[in-house]
Amino acid sequence: MAHPHNKYADFEALRDQAITLRRAGLSRRQIRDRLHVDNNDILNRLLEGEPPPEWTKRPNAKDDLKARARDLRLQGWTYDQIQVELGCSKSSISLWVRDLPKPERKRSTEDSAAIARRGWEAKLRIRDEERQQTKEVAKQAIGNLSPRELSLVGVGLYWAEGSKDKPYDRRENVTFVNSDPGMIQVFLAWLALLGVERERLRFNVMIHESADVTGAEKYWAELVDADHSTFNKTTLKKHNPKTVRKNVGDSYRGCLVIKVLQGADLYRRIEGSWYGIVVGATRQPDEMSG
């Protein structure tokens, strides 16, 4: 016989009462108060196997996120994609889906390479736009050249690219050779500034024999707006099969040679002007102010 002062002595009878109350929809707190069960371990044993009523279940938002994260993972989504979609941390996602298989790569090596290539091409386009913008700003900053500015530019241009008189090789003539169309145009504008008549100019093309000789001759004639009679015979450079040429393609047009007839006096003026530039550039500031 159970001790009269032990209220838990008839456990089975107490359990029957607890189960009846549970099935009637009472909460743990209500059952505890009704049966005066203050010991949580005893209460757990009394209600063992009996699910709580629906109204006592508190909704948990993370349960919905977890279910959604697991569903997306099974669809092959990455942690980054799930994070963006659900707005939760990667650590939580990792905890929720760690028992699921890792999704297989859906991109082939070729696809990945193509994506990387497109990204690199986009960067190159941005760089090229920045490069062109810098050049355009610098070009606009020059504006129109004064006669003096063009005169100085022309002297420097010639002294860099034109023929020069040497003590061991006297040749006071004006001959300019270049492959840059812009350089040719500036040189001709400079000659016009100096009063050199077009009738005194002679041209000839220098180009590799394997290039488009006829196309180059036509290009230079149109650029300088000169009659064919002012062009001497084109100079062809022999092709060396052992040499790998880089100046190939449609943009290669060789070089244009411009000679000024009866140019000895002009040459002396150019040389004198150049030495004047040297002196002016190297003169000390106090000498300039004096």
Image (cartoon, helix red, strand yellow):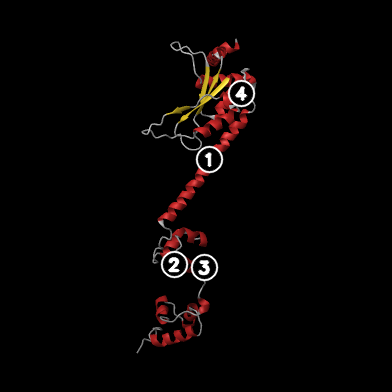
Q: Is residue 168 above or below residue 211?
A: above
Q: Amino acid at mark 4?
A: Ala
Of the numbered discs 2 and 3, the one sitting upstream in the chain is 3
Q: Quadrant of the N terminus?
A: bottom left
Residue sitting nearer the eye, 141 or 163: 163
Element at label 4: helix
Q: Position of residue 202 (x, y in %)?
A: 55, 21
Of the numbered discs 4 and 1, the one sitting upstream in the chain is 1
Q: Is residue 127 above or below residue 224?
A: below
Q: Is residue 87 left or right of residue 192?
A: left
**Crowd tier of the residue under label 1, counting other residues whose Cα lies within 10 Å: few below 14, some 14–19, many 20 or above:** few
Of the numbered discs 3 and 4, the one sitting upstream in the chain is 3
Give residue 140's quadrant in the image.
top right
Distance of mark 1 from mark 2, alpha carbons?
Answer: 43 Å
List the residue tagged with mark 1.
128
Which mark, residue 189?
Answer: 4
Q: Position of residue 53 (x, y in %)?
A: 50, 80
Q: Amino acid at mark 1?
A: Asp
Element at label 1: helix
Element at label 2: helix
Q: Is residue 123 left or right of residue 13?
A: right
The mark lying in front, picked from 1 and 2, is 1
Of the numbered discs 1 and 2, the one sitting upstream in the chain is 2
Q: Amino acid at mark 2?
A: Leu
The mark lying in front, picked from 4 and 2, is 4
List the residue tagged with mark 2.
74
Distance of mark 3 from mark 4, alpha carbons?
Answer: 80 Å
Of the numbered discs 4 and 2, the one sitting upstream in the chain is 2
List the residue tagged with mark 3.
61
Residue sitting nearer the eye, 121 or 18: 121
Distance of mark 4 from mark 2, alpha carbons?
Answer: 73 Å
